[in-house]
Amino acid sequence: MNPIHIAIVGVGKIVRDQHLPAIAGNADYRLIAAASRHGIVDGIDNFKSIEAMLEAVPAIDAVSLCMPPQFRYQAARVALEAGKHVFLEKPPGATLSEVADLESLASANGLSLFASWHSRYAPAVEAARRFLASTRINAVQVIWKEDVRHWHPNQDWIWQAGGLGVFDPGINALSIVTHILPNPLFITEATLEFPENRDAPIAAAIRFSDAHALPVTADFDWRQTGHQSWDIIAETDAGRMVLSEGGAKLSIDGKLVHDEPEREYPALYARFAEIIKTKQSDVDLAPLRHVADAFMLGRRKFVDAFID
């Protein structure tokens, strides 16, 4: 099969750190163009808009959309209407309705749409899923705390309405939890902490359950300094499971049972190539739906202003 001619839209830190190396390391792809208001990729044609890029480079087969979620819908619609397969960086859109519309458009045009949840491809996630499927789960605790100044310095869009705030990393945890637990969850209550000068939360405490009354809690916080916490802890009949470092390591009763190098984005691009070849889409909205439910049910608490 000829390589998939792919283009990148939105050239920022995540593209340089993750997308470009993953594409370069996969023989299924050939990167032929990029579009961005502020960045360029050396060695290929660069444009200021996706419209100009698609008009000038008709050979493009697929596009990866890596701009902030508030601007992703229109770019995705332009790409799908031009007959291109679409990779959506997480979260896949600013609203559930946007992504549902894109999914319908992709299906109507025989194109592949990929809502990529990179944390699901962390090395120990599948091992955790298998372990939980083999035992009774009694309780789950999610602790996802990091330093926003380290990971998102001076990124105003993330604090604006639609930017998700602490749910930008928190949705990574939700993408893992919804994948490894055997039954669907629903939110029962939430408290969202909003800096008095921002439109998106800096912290969230959430309670979930499932049809069998499984207690699940999640604690998201963007004010953590020093050690960064990305842990999912499950108390089970077979022992205490800790999925740590964002899904990189798995321990059972304190014994490390799974630890492999991180290959999240290479795995994402392998999956995207697979669904393009088989003419399918992969659009799971469960993580984004939980974020929407948290905003619907959440009690708002205003805290000190955040100054970057």
Image (cartoon, rainbow, N blue to C red):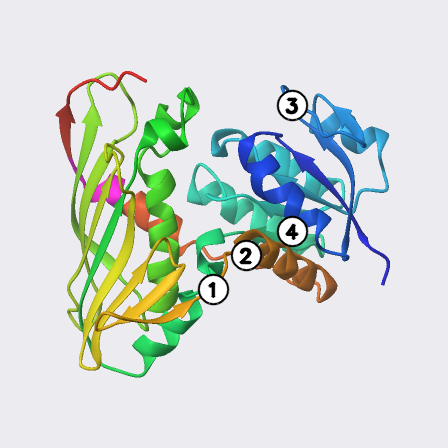
Kind of residue sitting beneath label 4: Ala
Q: Is residue 298 magenta?
A: yes
Tag in front: 3 or 4 = 3
| Mark earlier in primary sequence (2, 4) | 4
Q: Nearer the viewer, residue 120 or 92?
A: 120
The image shows residue 69, relative to residue 249, as above or below, that is: above
Label 2, label 1: how far apart the Cα atoms are: 9 Å
Q: Residue at x 15, y 20 (%)?
A: 304
Label 2, label 3: how far apart the Cα atoms are: 25 Å
Report which residue position mark 3 lands on. Answer: 39
Report which residue position mark 4 lands on. Answer: 106
Cβ–Cβ below 8 Å for labels 3 and 1? no
Are there few (<14), some (14-19), or many (20+) residues within 10 Å of tag 4?
Answer: many
Q: Magenta region: which residues? A: 294-299
| Mark earlier in primary sequence (3, 1) | 3
Tag in front: 2 or 3 = 2
The image shows residue 103, relative to residue 135, as above or below, that is: above
Report which residue position mark 2 lands on. Answer: 263
Kind of residue sitting beneath label 3: Gly
Q: Residue at x 57, y 29 (%)?
A: 12
Q: Secondary structure at mark 1?
A: loop
Kind of residue sitting beneath label 2: Arg
Residue 60, which numbered label?
none
Tag in front: 2 or 4 = 2
Cβ–Cβ below 8 Å for labels 2 and 1? yes
Residue 260, which numbered label?
1
Query: What percent of the width, then of the height, locates residue 110?
Result: 71, 57
Left or right of 86 in this view: 96: left
